[in-house]
Amino acid sequence: MLGWVGTLINKGWLDRDRYVHLSERKPFCGRGQPVQRPSALLSPAVMFSTRKTWDLSHAPRLQELWKKDISLDASSLDFLMSDGEDDASFLSLPTAAFSQRPSLTAELSETNAPSQQLLIQTLQDKVSAAARERPDVSAAQRCDCAAIRWSEFRCLNCPEEEQLVTRLRTQVEELEEKLLDQTQEVERLRSELGATDLEKQLELLVVENQRLKQELKSCRSSDIQSVDAAAGSCSCSHSQDADSLRREVSRWESQARQRERRLAELERELLEKSSRVESLRRQLDESNRQLEDGRRQLDESRWRQVEAEQKLNLRLQECEEELARQAATPPRVKYVTHTVEVESADSQKAVVELQTKNSALQDQLSVQRTLLRELETQLHESQRTCGQLRTQILVYEGEMERAQGQLEAEMQNLEEEKNRVIEEAFIRAESEMKAVHENLAGVRMNLLSLQPALRTLTGDYNCLKRQVQDFPFMLDKAISEAKQEICQVISELVRLKGNIRVFCRVRPVSQEEQDSADAKAMLSFDSDDDAILYLSSRGKVMTFELDKVFAPQATQEEVFQEVQSLVTSCIDGFNVCIFAYGQTGSGKTFTMEGVVDDPGINQRALRLLFSEVTEKAPDWDYTITVSMVEIYNETLR
Ligand SMILES: Nc1ncnc2c1ncn2[C@@H]1O[C@H](COP(=O)(O)OP(=O)(O)OP(=O)(O)O)[C@@H](O)[C@H]1O
């Protein structure tokens, strides 16, 4: 036992200091003679189980070891177990060897509770295997082996063993619950890091990125179109009003502000998405860290398991050696054999029960190992999935950074283009405004100069309008006045010329008259007055004053012109009479009738009369009657 404990301490599996205080006790003493214990290499299990005293005179090697203050190994355990002369000390060895197991298990459970079951199971398996692998031993040896098992079963049947089994079962249940919790935790981590939420978030981010690109493209195209439209409208800006240009510029500025607000919102959304990606990445890192912790715990559990297996193997080897030594030892105490034989049936039954329990525990252990392998597989799968997701996240982050860079560049270009267009529009608007102001000033000057003329024209227009309105009355008045004036003129003419006017027409001298004596009588005319006629006859000049004197060269037309007014006066209602008086051959017929080629007053007066009547026919109706009278030789015809 001391060698086993010492081996554990030398290998670093047990804490040496934990056993120092035990040196003050006196676990080993020989035959009532207390032995001063030189070292602290005793466990409480040994103290508890060693109820009989040992004679250290039969343990020179132990004394030597104690004096050297070194730890014991498996060989020292052989010595200790084989050198006892006292039967009681011999019998106490197996009891001590097995009864110390709960204490050891309790100590191990403090540091490695999950491996307890495996440790106990391994120990029991080794013992059972050792018993089965000795078919050729003698009956006495089998009896000794049975005695050992009986002692063990008796210890298992004790309350401490039952408590141990209960505690182990509780620990197994706790281990199962822990495995279940770890499985659920792994599932939760997979659900958090798996291809559900994270991929959905990434897909949403990609869709949002595409939407932002399309919206930016549409905004840029609409701005370019609006700029082109504005440029086209500015080309004919001479015909546009300055207010419309200002409204257009204000509208563009409003649109630009709206675009800027929209871009700010998009940037804010992008930042939110980036923060969301960052939080997801932190969650992923946290989950990976938890997975690493779980893996580390599993590694530690595995390591502890291996460690416990090594301990149990060592312990099993020691037990087997002890069993072999016990089997080789001659049966020194026969009654013990009898006692064992008496109770061998119960022991066999207990062995069967224990084997059944061992089988159940092995099954549970295999199940737990299977679960552990599945858990490790799931862990590896989760780690692989996490690696893939991490790679995808890096790829998406790179794409997002590139998209963000492109978006920022496009935003910058759009902003510069917008500023340039606005500046050009402002410049054009200012130039157009200047031209419009100049034109407006010229127009105002023209208006100022035209206002008096306009007022004059307005007055003239009003005057003309009034005149037009009064024109019918004025026309009637003018006609009346003209008629009155005409009547007055005619009256005055008649008054001036008299009611009877006398004209004198001198016909040319004929050829016959030139040869006669009468031709000497000469007529002369006054060159200054056409109403004077001089007649020279027989030395006397007689003067005749008439209304008109027509010389011989006077034509028919000239004579008619003199009487024409009289002819037309008859149209106005006056009575007129024209007649010729003179001696035969004086030219009356020639003047009144005329010749065919040169008509006289009658034909000319009728032509003029009918011409006037025809001209006034729309307004007047005339009735013309012609009558001819001749007085010849005092006869009227
Ligand atoms: N002014 C004249 N110029 C030229 N020839 C004229 C003119 N007057 C008259 N004679 C001619 O004198 C002639 C006589 O004229 P006419 O017959 O007219 O006279 P009379 O007075 O009518 O005569 P009677 O009383 O006999 O009828 C005509 O041959 C006519 O051609």
Image (cartoon, rainbow, N blue to C red):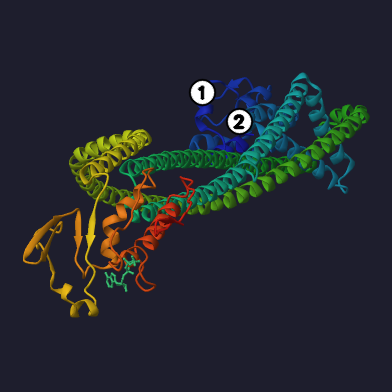
| Tag 2 and tag 1, C-beta contact below 8 Å | no
* Amino acid tagged 1: His
Whether the residue carrying mark 1 lies under 8 Å from ligand 1 is answered with: no
* Amino acid tagged 2: Leu
Q: Residue at x 36, y 40 (%)?
A: 247
Residue 534 in picture, x, y percent from top left: 11, 62
Nearest the viewer among 302 and 260 is 260
* Image position of 495 with respect to 150: above or below: below
User: Residue pushed farthest left?
Assistant: 539
Sequence order check, earlier mark of 2 and 1: 1
Secondary structure of the residue carrying tag 2 is helix
Nearest the viewer among 524 and 356 is 524
Q: Quadrant of ligand 1?
A: bottom left
Secondary structure of the residue carrying tag 1 is helix
* Image position of 466 with respect to 391: above or below: above
Graded by Cα atoms within 10 Å as few (under 14), some (14 to 19) or many (20 or more), the crowding at tag 2 reads many
Quadrant in the rendering for residue 177: top right
Residue 189 in picture, x, y percent from top left: 63, 39
In the drawing, what numbered circle is on residue 45? none
Q: Residue at x 62, y 39 (%)?
A: 192
User: Disc 2 designates what residue?
Assistant: 56
Residue 151 in picture, x, y percent from top left: 80, 28
User: Disc 1 designates what residue?
Assistant: 21
What's the distance in space between the residues labelled 2 and 1, CA to CA? 21 Å
Pick the quarter of the image with the N terminus: top right
Residue 519 in picture, x, y percent from top left: 16, 74
User: In this orientation, does residue 475 appear?
Assistant: yes
Graded by Cα atoms within 10 Å as few (under 14), some (14 to 19) or many (20 or more), the crowding at tag 1 reads few
Left or right: residue 384 compared with residue 577: right
Left or right: residue 21 compared with residue 493: right
Nearest the viewer among 358 and 274 is 274
